[in-house]
Amino acid sequence: AKDPVRVLVTGAAGQIGYALVPMIARGVMLGPDQPVILHMLDIEPAAEALNGVKMELIDAAFPLLRGVVATTDAIEAYKGVDIAIMVGGFPRKEGMERKDVMSKNVSIYKAQASALEQHASPNCKVLVVANPANTNALILKEFAPSIPEKNITCLTRLDHNRALGQISERLQVHFGDVKNVIIWGNHSSTRYPDVNHATVGTSAGLKPVKELVGDDNWLNTKFIATVQQRGAAIIKARKLSSALSAASSACDHIHDWVLGTPKGTWVSMGVYSDGSYGIQPGLIYSFPVTCEKGEWKIVQGLKIDEFSRGKMDATAKELMEEKSLAYSCLN
Ligand code: NDP
């Protein structure tokens, strides 16, 4: 039998955390034969709720769940974890300036970075979900320099899955038959969902999404806007932000990173830019990646048209602005 893997969820008493921990305990994230020990961290005001989540995890009697650590102490939470999913963060409240949210989160992530560096397993894989996800991940990377930079990522898989969802609805095909969409850039409203390389598996073989949709105007306007504004549409409908889809996509992200992407398929992940596609190094930017043996690699050599170039640069520019805003908050 495999040794258990220690998985940390921060902000575990929140909405996404509540949807996420049972998925991890059921093996959705790491596979049906991988035992897990769940570490859950939250802040003092959420301590009682966090304990309630722990009680429910025990009551669910998940066979793969070999232990639960529920705590408000960062040292205990980070101790020996192999995977850290960072959902805890200060929410955007009405009337708050962007700079105020940024300043709160940047100081949270700076503190998390030192706990991570000092107490997590040295090869811990990190996924940041809390917004501003790319910039929070960048702060973690900067302030936890002993963790390999390849290990620090942020979630854009929800945007990726939303793009797959919109295409499959439009073409009336199964989600699983659509592949290789790309989310470029920031997990914000400037994200760019790109279907120029996406395909649909049909009985006649792989067909380009662009050809099957046959309506570039829809792809360049309505489709992009729907994916970009999907989060807001869910808040309007549910009066709460998306949680089950965010949790499910976080599982997909770690699952594919650890267990690999199927041959011929890529996914989108926010990773540290190495300069690929002219995106300046020093940003956490969402790229198409393939994964093998626990390592991601940016897909190379895709042809980028002028329309895509403009969108990719615009979202990079926003990330550079966020980065300097984040640094100004730290000083
Ligand atoms: P959620 O669980 O709904 O969201 C958590 C974070 O995920 C938010 O930053 C949210 O950003 C972000 N997020 C990223 N992608 C998505 C998406 N697609 N849909 C929704 N959210 C997304 O928030 P809760 O308030 O329910 O839970 C947060 C938890 O964090 C609480 O338990 C709280 O106690 C804890 N917390 C921890 C802090 C710390 O570590 N110091 C500080 C403050 C809170 P956005 O706000 O932009 O929607």
Image (tube, rainbow, N blue to C red):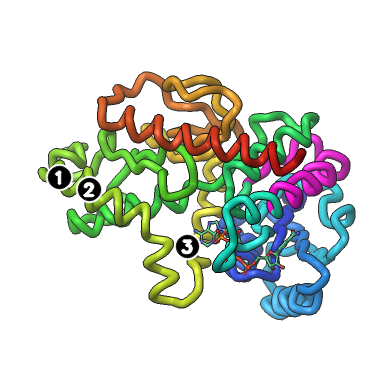
Residue 61's label in the rendered image is none
Whether residue 258 is visible: no
User: Does the magenta portion include 118?
Assistant: yes
Secondary structure type for disc 1: helix
Q: Residue at x 70, y 63 (%)?
A: 11
- Looking at the rendered structure, the kind of residue marked 3 is Ser
Front one among 251 and 138: 138
- The residue stretch that appears in magenta: 105-127
Q: Residues within 10 Å of mark 1 (few under 14, many from 20)?
A: few
Tell me where residue 256 appears, x and y as whole percent. Answer: 52, 43
**Which one is earlier in the sequence, the residue at label 1 or at label 3?**
1
Front one among 233 and 245: 233
* Residue at numbered disc 2: 221
Say which quarter of the image contains residue 29.
Answer: bottom right
Tell me where residue 26 appears, x and y as whole percent. Answer: 61, 64
Q: Residue at x 36, y 19 (%)?
A: 301
User: Does the magenta portion include 111?
Assistant: yes
